[in-house]
Image (cartoon, rainbow, N blue to C red):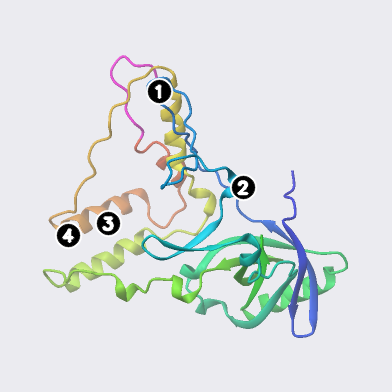
Amino acid sequence: MPPRSLWNGAIRFGLVTVPVKVFGAVESKQVRFREVHLADGAPLEHRRLCSKEGEEVPYEEVVRGYELEPGRYVVLTSDEIQAVERIGSKTIEIEDFVPADQIDPVYYDKPYYLGPGKGGADAYRLLARALERTGRVGIGRFVLRTKERLVALHPSDGVLRIDTMRFHDEVVSGSEVEIPRPQTAVSEREAKMGETLVEALVHEWRPEDYADTYRERVLELVRAKAAGETIEPPPPAPGPAPDLLGALEASLAEARKRGGGKARPRAKRAAGRGRPPARAGSRR
């Protein structure tokens, strides 16, 4: 079933307008749990309680407030909030075109595909081709669900895609991360062994090789528990190797044994890792 359009509008850069439709580019496969009462297995309900009165508050009496200081809120109505939102804007305004390789991936948030709108097929193809040939990304803004978002416009195999972006002040700089000084300096031999190990594990990027093995293990756990099996806790994770050089040599030997540099069924092999073992006599 083809995806439904989330938004209809246009891209505008200079005096050129390209009618487009926005489609979701990702689909969540996350395993979702409900909170239930341990005693009887009934699902729990979450209600809005007033912290002062202790009474449940009906939805029509709920407004949004901004906390200026502990316990002091400025209450804003929906109309007041909408006064600063660009409701009704149906244009992706491209402000600049920048080299694609200058954007750190940490700024990207959520992707959406763009399809040509009515009468916009020619201009759509022209824009996609221009971006592909120049290696540029369009930076602009558009409104989705009443919120103005910064976006990056990319070409993707002849299809246009936008990624919503984080603003600069939302990204934490790596320089702010506390990294302890190493007790000993990395030796030249260790550095070369590390480089050799990385090269031995190089493979072509194939996204289909990387399945969500966590989701598979969770669903297997659910099926086992529903069948009455008893689940043993997993063994503790190993700590860092005390002999770094020895660990590098052993890792390199293992990589060579597996045939580094050749495509391998990574996802299939990984799927069996970390499965919770059943006790002896349990059904599998």
Inspect the image, locate mark 4, and give the three-letter code of the amino acid beneath it: Leu
Q: Where is residue 271 in the image (x, y as percent from the top left)?
A: 43, 39
Extreme residue in the bottom direction:
14
Judged from the image, the secondary structure of the residue bearing numbered disc 4 is helix
Extreme residue in the right direction:
119
Task: Examine the image and state in which quarter residue 133 appears.
Answer: bottom right
Q: Could you tell me which residue is drawn at 72 percent across and 49 percent down?
A: 3
Q: Could you tell me which residue is drawn at 60 percent across and 66 percent down?
A: 163
Disc with the residue nearer the chain's start (2 vs 3): 2
Residue named by callout 2 = 60
- Closer to the camera: disc 2 or disc 1? 2
Q: Can I make out residue 16 in this image?
A: yes
Q: Could you tell me which residue is drawn at 47 percent across and 24 percent down?
A: 42
Q: Can I make out residue 156 in this image?
A: no
Inspect the image, locate mark 3, and give the three-letter code of the amino acid beneath it: Leu
Extreme residue in the top direction:
281
* Residue range highlighted in magenta: 275-284
Task: Compute the Cα span from label 4 to label 2.
Answer: 62 Å
Q: Nearer the viewer, residue 196 or 82?
A: 82
- Closer to the camera: disc 3 or disc 1? 1
Residue named by callout 4 = 244
Q: Where is residue 115 in the image (x, y as percent from the top left)?
A: 76, 62
Crowd band around label 2 with a 10 angstrom C-alpha radius: few (<14), some (14–19), many (20+): few
Residue 44 shown left or right of residue 142 in the figure? left
Inspect the image, locate mark 1, and give the three-letter code of the amino acid beneath it: Lys
Crowd band around label 3 with a 10 angstrom C-alpha radius: few (<14), some (14–19), many (20+): many
Task: Examine the image and state in which quarter residue 189 appears.
Answer: bottom left
Determine which of the numbered discs, if any, sits on residue 225 in the image.
1
Judged from the image, the secondary structure of the residue bearing numbered disc 1 is helix
Residue named by callout 3 = 252
Task: Compute the Cα span from label 1 to label 4.
Answer: 40 Å
Judged from the image, the secondary structure of the residue bearing numbered disc 2 is helix
